[in-house]
Image (tube, rainbow, N blue to C red):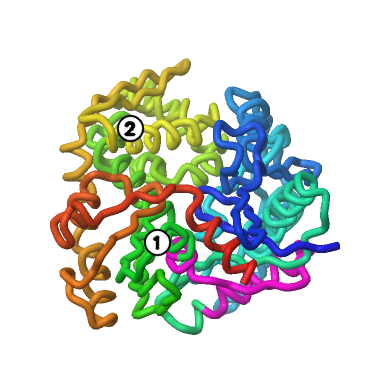
Amino acid sequence: MSIKVGLDFGTSNSGIAVYDGHRVTILPIDGQNVQPEVVKTLLYITRDYQAYIGQEAVELYYRDNVNRQRRFVKQWAGEIDYHGADMHYVRDIYVYVDELKPGRLLQYIKTALRKEGYRGTQIFERYYTVGDLAQTYLRLLKNRAEGILGEKIEAATLGRPVKFAESPENDRKAEDTLRQAAYEAGFKQVDFELEPIAAALDYEQTLAKPQNVVIFDFGGGTLDIAVMRLGGGERKVYASGGVDVAGSDFDRAIIQKRMLAHFGLGKIQHQPEILEMIQAVPDWMALPELATPLNRNTLDKAIRAGLAPARLKALQTLIYNDLAFTFYNRVEAAKIALSDSGATVISLDDKGVALWELYTRHQFENDIFDYISKVEKVLFDTLSSAGLEPGQVDAVVKTGGSSNIPLFSSLLGRIFGAKKVKQSDAFSSVVAGLAIRAGM
């Protein structure tokens, strides 16, 4: 016997749910997570190509990588065949490879689907396309769900953002890649629903009479909006809209505007190779690739020369002790804390780095203020497409982790009235709605 599920393949978190016609059950996919129903969209692939997801991936990464030894060996990477004027020569190309590197941690797999020009990545001796990465993650998610249900899962309704990409061609390509990845993961039947519409189906279960509703789905990767008529047997989508703004952008903004000085920005002027390393700090996945003997030598020389030695030592430690993921998580945790507190501390303490930064909600709101206009524009554009004025909206339903940021809650309250703004479950409303759609 097979079963159909709702599957939320999110930028930061994922989940699977089933609907029996009366009740939604969100499966406890990740027993190691504080919220078992939520599994982080993280993939860890080891040197022998074993793959792990969620909290298990995080813990294996920390166990195997942080403060580990490195040993670089020279490896042939190919050759250059040069023709120019009256010259012709062939030259071998070598790279230094860390032969002790135990595995690779990947995040934002869903974002890679819509990243124009991005095809995939090399992991040890194998090349993984974006579809390969998505397939690997979905297969492991599916296997866990089947273990919980004790049944085969052959069909799924997957969520997708309103816009994977601005161009219709790239949007279609991203959906096709995700569909094919789901087939290769073992699903025999795959269909899609827009994520804000899925959240609307979950909210609809609470309604006794019809309402005009705005769904404000603001997660880790995109902001998605749907304007709908729901409840009392009525269901109509008036309009939907989306923009490529979300929580990961805010994390990068914090690092770029507040954290880079801890690693030498402003102190280093005429060292382009070092400035390049500092500017890479907001991209935690790029930092481990900078851990080469050449870069270590460059940093060592600068430190011995007295060029901001404490800050460059912190940069060196961040790169060579594999602390980038830890640092990024500390920044994200501070951002989340500011939804409930007026101030928090971003800290990282390890040999060679002692970072401590008091960070206030006021500073955070200044750092992300430029995004407000983009959010407001897509909101009003979607309302206009729906043919509704703010006063004609009965409820505004927030979902997704970024929807809890006070700056955006205040924006919704100012436009629609604070009493109309409703909070659904930030992490489960979409997957619950996808399960309802699957059940239809």
* Residue 177 part of the magenta segment: yes
Question: Which residue is drawn at the image coordinates 32% and 45% (left, top)?
Answer: 404
Pointer 1 with pointer 2, Cβ within 8 A: no
Q: List the residue tagged with mark 1.
A: 207
- Judge by depth and name the residue closer to the eye, 320 or 341: 341
Q: Position of residue 166 (x, y in %)?
A: 40, 77
49 to the left or right of 382: right
Q: Position of residue 159 (x, y in %)?
A: 55, 65
In the drawing, what numbered circle is on residue 18? none
Q: CA distance from mark 1 to mark 2?
A: 32 Å
271 to the left or right of 296: left
Q: Which amino acid lies under the numbered mark 2 shown in the image of this protein?
A: Ala
Q: What residue range appears in magenta? A: 172-200
Q: Position of residue 120 (x, y in %)?
A: 62, 62
Sooner in the amino-acid sequence: mark 1 or mark 2: 1
Circle 1 — which element? Answer: loop
The picture quadrant where one finds residue 388 is: bottom left
Q: Is residue 155 above or below residue 67?
A: below
- Tell me the chief SS of the magenta region: helix
Q: List the residue tagged with mark 2.
A: 337
Q: Is residue 17 above or below residue 278?
A: below
- Does residue 83 appear in the picture of this structure? yes
14 to the left or right of 313: right
Q: Residue furthest left?
A: 414
Q: Residue furthest right?
A: 1
* Residue 183 part of the magenta segment: yes
86 to the left or right of 92: left
Q: Position of residue 359 (x, y in %)?
A: 24, 30
